[in-house]
């Protein structure tokens, strides 16, 4: 599964009110105190807060606090029970039967009694997720399921079209309530649920403020025991520098993704813990191949040859990253180390543009058939992020040297998402992807995934890529799948639908008052119900 990373999406002081335990609240009984509040900074804000329509990392992190899946993952990255207390798998690997917990209730709306979680919620979630009118990047990930059947109120059976590798881990998709949606058949971004979700997780949405702060409060009746921290407040920032200052001046307690320029200062401050985590992610410039000028791969490759990625990485991120060559995240088992990144070679870039039929006009801009090579580059909320701003300016300057005019537009996050994913109104975009460990790139590069709100925003299409993606899904041999993905890497690197940039070492920073912090590499808050703040440091 891919989610758009908050590195590019992403100072008010709050009065923090302690939540009083309710009668009969479940306790973790692990000896850690309850209480306190955690204000954390995000670079941007989520468009939606439900786990089906969302496709950005900020929303994924919030959903991790609000919702549960049938299965989960522990700190050793092993599959564990979650909403399902146990399961059976048939010998042929095609039938998965889940036996659900009977002590789970949905977050209760004010003035209402809690509603029990049952098999009906699981079946409805799957059907909504797969409905043709539901726009979600998850659909392609679950096409291997044939049917879902209710055995009884607390037993659900999934029959697969075919056995697949690591199928059990796929059942970690978040379950939503049957009674929560306006339309129980499909979900749209207009459904009130996407902004006011209810789940079964350790935290409940209390409200979203006028400043778009997302305030979550502890679920007193969480089936795994009440989480220790009373409140999580997600505070959006459009400026990474201000977010860093907010941490330094104690206006927030945590930054999920630290600006690399702030790392030296934070390393020297004893108030904070600077914790690295290895998200499977990379940054890129993506091309819209609906533009005839960009439909020619020689043009796209020329852009990659023209950009000095090492110079940018060293200058703007202190060299804390790795330049990449293709569609899989470095560190992933699927990444093909034999495919080297294209070198910085402006002469080769110029040659490719000439081969593609471009000549320099009187104004120095390359043109073809009277059309200048003048393109729009759209970037989300990053105008005040110095590192991102420098990357954009450098990209523009590198391309100007080979006669390409880049007009950069910095947009508010939601407007940017609509232009890129809904209206496809762009020539080039700047973004990052964050992956789970499935190495599933089908929603990014399969031709069937080009369309409104889908992740193949550039309309990339290659029959060989489509066939290999399908073949990768069908094989049960891990080594064969690795070989297929190496071929995919090679072809996509050559096609150059993106100028693949780099993967960065991610760092979170948090105040030392926060204890027992374990960070999930891409979902971040998976283990947050066990975090705590000592009584003496609660406020």
Image (spheres, rainbow, N blue to C red):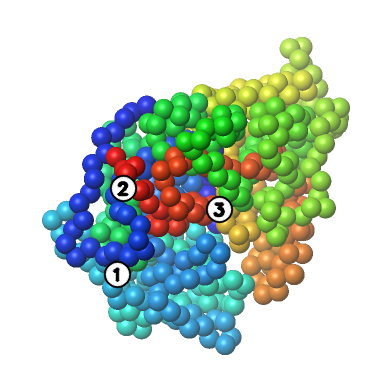
Numbered badge on residue 91:
none
Residue under pointer 3: 521
Residue found 39% across the figure and 63% down from its top: 68
Q: Report crowding for label 2: few under 14, some 14 to 19, many 20 or more residues within 10 A (C-alpha).
A: few
Q: Is residue 63 above or below residue 174?
A: above
Q: Is 522 or 181 nearer to us in this picture?
A: 522
Q: Report crowding for label 1: few under 14, some 14 to 19, many 20 or more residues within 10 A (C-alpha).
A: some
Q: Is 315 or 384 nearer to us in this picture?
A: 315
Indicate left or right for 291 with 484 as reference. left
Indicate left or right for 262 with 372 as reference. left
Indicate left or right for 162 with 405 as reference. left
Q: Mark 1 near mark 3, Cβ–Cβ under 8 Å?
A: no
Residue under pointer 1: 104
Residue under pointer 2: 535
Q: Report crowding for label 3: few under 14, some 14 to 19, many 20 or more residues within 10 A (C-alpha).
A: some
Mark 1 or mark 3: name the one nearer the start of the chain.
1
Residue 401: x percent and y percent?
77, 20
| Placement of the C terminus among the 4 image quadrants | top left
Structural distance between the alpha carbons of marks 1 and 3: 27 Å
Mark 1 or mark 2: name the one nearer the start of the chain.
1
Residue 316: x percent and y percent?
66, 28
């Amino acid at each position: 599964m891919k989610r758009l990373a908050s590195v590019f999406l992403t100072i008010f002081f709050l009065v923090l009110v302690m939540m009083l335990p309710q009668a009969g609240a479940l306790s973790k009984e692990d000896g850690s105190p309850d209480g306190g509040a955690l204000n954390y900074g995000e670079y941007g804000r989520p468009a939606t807060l439900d786990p089906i329509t969302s496709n950005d990392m900020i929303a994924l992190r919030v959903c991790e606090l609000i919702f549960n899946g049938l299965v989960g993952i522990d700190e050793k990255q092993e599959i564990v029970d979650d909403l399902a207390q146990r399961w059976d798998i048939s010998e042929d690997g095609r039938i998965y039967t889940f036996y659900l917990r009977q002590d789970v209730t949905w977050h209760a709306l004010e003035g209402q009694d809690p509603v029990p979680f049952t098999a009906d919620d699981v079946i409805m979630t799957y059907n909504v997720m797969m409905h043709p009118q539901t726009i979600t990047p998850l659909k392609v990930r679950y096409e291997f399921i044939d049917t879902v059947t209710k055995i009884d109120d607390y037993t659900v059976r999934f029959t697969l079209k075919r056995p697949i590798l690591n199928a059990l881990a796929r059942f970690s998709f978040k379950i939503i309530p049957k009674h929560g949606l306006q339309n129980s058949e499909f979900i749209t971004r207009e459904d009130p649920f996407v902004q006011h979700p209810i789940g079964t997780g350790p935290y409940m949405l209390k409200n979203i403020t006028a400043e778009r702060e997302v305030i979550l409060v502890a679920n007193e009746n969480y089936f795994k025991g009440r989480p220790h921290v009373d409140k999580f407040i997600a505070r959006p920032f459009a400026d990474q520098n201000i977010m860093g200052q907010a941490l330094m001046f104690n206006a927030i307690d945590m930054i999920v993704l630290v600006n690399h320029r702030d790392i030296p200062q934070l390393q020297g401050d004893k108030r904070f813990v600077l914790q690295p985590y290895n998200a499977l992610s990379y940054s890129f410039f993506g091309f819209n191949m609906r533009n005839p000028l960009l439909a020619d791969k020689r043009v796209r490759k020329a852009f990659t040859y023209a950009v000095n990625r090492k110079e940018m990485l060293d200058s703007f991120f202190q060299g804390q990253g790795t330049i990449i060559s293709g569609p899989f995240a470095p560190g992933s088992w699927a990444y093909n180390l034999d495919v080297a990144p294209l070198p910085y070679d402006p002469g080769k870039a110029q040659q490719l543009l000439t081969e593609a039929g471009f000549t320099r006009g009187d104004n120095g801009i390359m043109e073809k058939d009277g059309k200048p090579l003048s393109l729009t580059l759209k970037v989300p909320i990053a105008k005040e992020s110095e590192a991102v701003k420098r990357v954009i300016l450098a990209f523009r300057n590198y391309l100007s040297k080979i006669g390409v005019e880049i007009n950069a537009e910095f947009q508010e996050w939601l407007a940017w998402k609509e232009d890129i994913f809904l209206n496809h109104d762009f020539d080039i975009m700047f973004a990052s992807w964050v992956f789970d460990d499935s190495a599933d790139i089908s929603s990014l590069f399969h031709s069937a995934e080009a369309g409104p709100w889908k992740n193949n925003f550039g309309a990339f299409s290659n029959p060989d890529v489509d066939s290999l993606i399908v073949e990768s899904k069908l094989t049960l041999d891990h080594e064969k799948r690795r070989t297929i993905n190496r071929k995919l890497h090679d072809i996509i690197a050559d096609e150059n639908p993106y100028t693949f940039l780099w993967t960065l070492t991610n760092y979170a920073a948090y105040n030392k008052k926060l204890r027992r912090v374990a960070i999930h590499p891409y979902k971040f808050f998976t283990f947050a119900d066990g975090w705590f703040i000592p009584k003496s440091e609660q406020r």
